[in-house]
Image: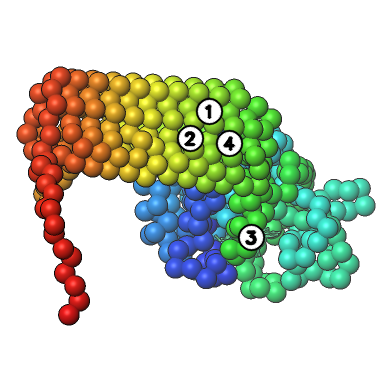
Amino acid sequence: MALSIIILAAGEGSRMRSHLPKVLHRLAGIPLLGHVMRTSRRLAAAHIVVVYGHGGEHVREAFPEEAVTWVEQAERLGTGHAVEQALPHVSPDDTVLVLYGDVPLIAESTLRQLITKVDDHSLALLTARLDDPSGYGRIVRDDQGSVIRIVEDKDATEAERAIAEINTGILAIKAELLASCLATVTNDNAQGEYYLTDIIAKAVEKGVSVLTASPGNLDEIMGVNNRAQLAELERSFQLAQARELLTSGVTLRDPARFDLRGSLTAGRDVEIDVNVIFEGEVTLGDRVRIGANTIICNTRIGDDVVIQPHCIIDGAEIGHGCQLGPFARIRPETVCHERARIGNFVEVKKSIIGQGSKINHLSYVGDSSVGRNVNIGAGTITCNYDGANKHHTEIGDDVFIGSDSQLIAPVKVGDGATIGAGSTITRDVPAQELTLSRASQQTIRGWKRPAKE
Ligand code: UD1
Ligand code: CA
């Protein structure tokens, strides 16, 4: 039997006070709806139908790659109405799982538990017991403890409001049963809405039993209605990721000051100081040490690399034993081979830095290939841009470039060449020779500074 997932995402999210639709706000770098889609994909659903409303076009455009069916709910008439819009895209004998686009952390394992309870005679509800159940629909059970209906907070009696077991909103049910129950739901209630929750009583009338499951932890069922809730959920998600890394053997100086917006693979005995942010896919080798206040994005880092504080590394490959920073900026398509050193206030873009080469201070190296054991002095600049096009700089092995030199690309520097400090290099430099371009020093004897009149 196939699984269809209906994701409700038509909410306005007015409490976010944002031009961006709520489900596009990001948690750990991914839109809220993206989290739900990712979990849905893991369940290998035959169909995923997303019901969108307000700002819907932006929501669709944010997921151009997703193989989902988009259904517009033009008028927001309630959760029952929203699900009804999606039903034509679901096969009658599918099991339908209803998820919310603004409940991002629902776990795959919890959902699997729920789905397995469903058959022709049973539907499954995800419920939870809360210390403060106010605002939620309450689960009403009979004397035998069987679920008989859900009552919404606004429609509940005093006694019903005292029930601690709440409806998370997430449920699984056979499509045919869902359709037949929904067909008779009315909007005769406090909010004048078609409640999805009303199908429970209808199903019970038909002799269907209502089974329940509960989430592994309460973050799984938390919805995002405002930015405070988003921030809270972000921190608890980050803490959970941090704990997982600690368990796997990574040292985090402070798990509360750690952010992973993507995925991190780390070797043995990795040490990460405070306020380090990882984005996209990052791989760290064994014994990597990362200093405070560093951002690393889509990068592979080899064994024994030391990254001093305050570095920004994006789209790079850093070989074994390299040392970076403090205050280094490594931009996309940079490859640093083994034991290279990139020091403070150095920017490297789209360049290959050879084994053991050093760029230790205040330099810009862009669109360049640098050989092995090269020493690039402080203040060296590869002038790669002529105002219209970018040009390449090629530096051979064992080159020594004196401080404050400019290499006007396109230009080649031969193996073993030495460039005198303060040179502006406009033509290719021969191997093994000293090349410099520098006005010779002179002294004007007896010269006097002008005096103020
Ligand atoms: C709903 C449940 C309630 C449950 C609570 C859990 C109903 C009637 N009530 O209440 O039992 O405890 O969720 O958070 O289902 N949506 C649409 N179209 C609509 C209405 C809602 O797409 O016309 C979407 C919203 O974007 C949201 C979700 O459905 O993602 C839930 O809607 P919301 O209005 O927040 O429902 P609650 O009143 O909180
Ligand atoms: Ca809600």
- Viewer-side residue, 259 vs 377: 377
Give the SS element for disc 1.
loop
Q: Earlier in the sequence, mark 2 or mark 3?
A: 3
Q: Earlier in the sequence, mark 1 or mark 2?
A: 1
Q: Between marks 2 and 3, how big is the CA–CA gap?
A: 34 Å
Q: Between marks 1 and 3, how big is the CA–CA gap?
A: 34 Å
Residue 142: x percent and y percent?
A: 88, 53
Would residue 337 be visible to someone looking at this image?
no
Nearer to us of marks 3 and 4 is 4
Q: Which residue is mark 4?
A: 272
Nearer to us of marks 1 and 3 is 1
- Viewer-side residue, 155 vs 366: 366
- At 85% from the left edge and 53% from the top edge, which residue is drawn? 141
Name the disc covering residue 288, or none. Answer: 1
Q: Between marks 3 and 4, how big is the CA–CA gap?
A: 28 Å
Contact between marks 3 and 4 (CB within 8 A): the answer is no
Contact between marks 4 and 2 (CB within 8 A): the answer is no
Q: Which residue is mark 3?
A: 229
Residue type at mark 4?
Ile
Does 244 sit left or right of 375 as displayed?
A: right
Q: Earlier in the sequence, mark 4 or mark 1?
A: 4
